[in-house]
Image (cartoon, rainbow, N blue to C red):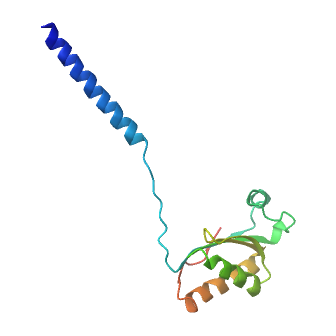
Amino acid sequence: MKSSIRHRNKEKEQQYTILNREETMSEKQRIIQELVPGKQITLAHIIANPDPVLYDKLGLDPAVDYARSAIGVLTVSPAETAIIIADIAIKSAGVELGFVDRFSGSVIITGTVSEVEASIQAILLYGKETLAYTVSPITRT
């Protein structure tokens, strides 16, 4: 009788150990993130009259006149196209280049609301007509 009780206890311990291992393994999930390069401008956003704190947090020039300011945020794929859209942004309107990342495809521009909007419109037009990219509409906050 004692051996059957020991056997049952041993089985329960083994089941408990297996469950603990499964729980531990399920907690350690590995996430693989892949970028599927397409020819697209995925984000074209204008932040009108941003709070001065946002400039500081983004590492942008705090000397900008905050009452007339705007920040433009764009993302593009393939990421190297960020260099091209940064060039178009500067040449098409009187914006300042805040940030370009050729590895993630992110571009941040600053200027007046009308300058940032004109710059983003020029970028989207060039992307759509010259580069044959899929472009997203301009969004605003």
Q: Decide if residue 47 is on the left or right side of residue 104.
A: right
Quarter of the image with the N terminus is top left
Q: Residue at x 74, y 64 (%)?
A: 50
* Residue most extreme to the top: 2
Q: Residue at x 39, y 36 (%)?
A: 24
Residue 93 appears in which quarter of the rendering? Answer: bottom right
Q: Position of residue 134 (x, y in %)?
A: 51, 82
Quarter of the image with the C terminus is bottom right
Q: Observer-nearest residue: 74 or 39?
A: 39
Q: How many marks?
A: 0
Residue 118 appears in which quarter of the rendering? Answer: bottom right
Q: Decide if residue 56 is on the left or right side of residue 18.
A: right
Q: Observer-nearest residue: 102 or 123?
A: 102
Q: Residue at x 35, y 31 (%)?
A: 20
Q: Decide if residue 60 is on the left or right side of residue 38.
A: right
Q: Position of residue 117 (x, y in %)?
A: 70, 80
* Residue most extreme to the left: 1
Q: Position of residue 119 (x, y in %)?
A: 71, 82
Q: Residue at x 79, y 64 (%)?
A: 60
* Residue most extreme to the right: 63
Relative height, residue 47 to residue 25 (above, below): below
Residue 64 appears in which quarter of the rendering? Answer: bottom right
Q: Position of residue 111 (x, y in %)?
A: 78, 75
